[in-house]
Image (spheres, helix red, strand yellow):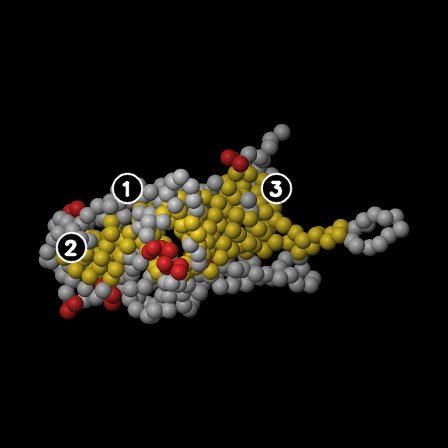
Amino acid sequence: MSIASGIEKKVILAPQATQGTVAVAGLATAQYMRRVTSDLNLTKETYQSNEIRPDRQVADFRHGVQSVEGTLNGELSPGTYDLFMAAILRKDFIAGVSDAANSNVASDAAGTLTRDDALGSWLEDGFKIGDVIRCTGFTATANNGINLMITAVTDTVLTVLALNGSTLTTEAKGQAVTTTVTGKKTWTPLTGHTEDWFTMEHYFEDVDLSEVYYDIKPNSMNISLPATGLATIDTGIMGLNHNFLETGESPYFSAVLDASTQGIVAAVNGVITVEGTSIALITSLDFSIAANLTNEPVVGSDVKPDLFDGKVVVTGNMSVYFEDATFRDYFKNETEVSIACAFTTSNDDDAEFISFSMPRVKVGGSSKDDGEKGIIQTMPFTALLDTNAGGDTGVTATDTLSTTLSIQDSTLS
């Protein structure tokens, strides 16, 4: 007798062409998913009879409308959860902007990349606060390939901060320098929102059974960045339908891509900036993305007809050492701030990374703990649509306004 073991379970995710059609088994668009846990399950509403009977017993109990609910919980790594990230923000990842082979770029040890206004503009090129860039072409090779987060941008000057704490070397203009936003980005757009549907299979290899769930979407995403430990990502899933496959029929997917192999990110490797300034006082940061999906049953079917999109809502918490009035007064004065953070898989100059940018944030509290230790403020916050037009927001040059949240992944090409 075999009993299914979690270590033998394989979780497979594939995009669907459309709602109502299970992802094709042999197209090699399915991928094994890395996980800590995955607890996707079929659920049903149930109805118990309320009939009053002389035998004083319950005579009937029925199953009603079905749905699919659960989570995929993992440790955050680049190139692993991008399908769900794009789906919950409702925009496909697109390539970052680039200023190619520009001999009009100088660097200095203060962390700026400077060019002449008459020979182009960083803003017009589409570079944004929170973007992580890499440069090539400097004679000072130490400047090449470093992960640099943009903390301020004007037409002529990019102010940058190396994710691993290294420093740029001063070099005059004259070399053919290429500056590129590394990898790809997604964000919640102003228009043209995508709607992505997925099929997920749980294949219990040791007992040769499969549970295939389709017409699913991510409904929530919780990202936690503790000061010690690995970053985590927990995705809440809603769905409409399922197929259960028996021994000899499993697995459903016959062509599956290998799981990603990138390292796991940790908050100790990377930077967090608030209002463009790197902060070393934050003891933890977590935030949640809610898609606010809804569905309703209909008469004559045990399957709900659709999952309806709601607003994308981003909320979170910062824990910050109480050093001065700065963070407290963000709450007291209802000051809007920006938060950008990027985390790497190692401390190398060009380590793979994933970054998050929230250009307009309001803090909703500033409670302090106590004890024989450093006092910590707990600061809940809500990210908002940045309605300030301009090039120094958080998105690409094609948007005249900003977004609530953008995500950049260096491994996507």
For mark 2, does the 10 Å Cα neighbourhood hold few (<14), some (14 to 19), or many (20 or more) residues?
many
> Do residues under tags 2 and 1 come within 8 Å of each other at their CB atoms?
no
The amino acid type found where label 2 is placed reads Ser
Are discs 3 and 1 less than 8 Å apart at CB?
no
For label 3, the residue is: 246
Q: Nearer the viewer, mark 3 or mark 1?
A: 1
Determine the image quadrant of residue 119.
bottom left
Residue 180 visible in the shown view? yes
Q: Which mark is residue 347?
A: 1
Image coords of residue 340 (percent x, y)? 34, 55
Residue 113, percent from left and from top = 18, 57
Q: Say what amino acid the circle numbered 3 marks.
A: Glu
Q: Amino acid at mark 1?
A: Asn
Work out which residue is located at the far right of the displayed protein and give it. 54
> On the rendered structure, is 120 left or right of 227?
left
Residue denoted by label 2? 107
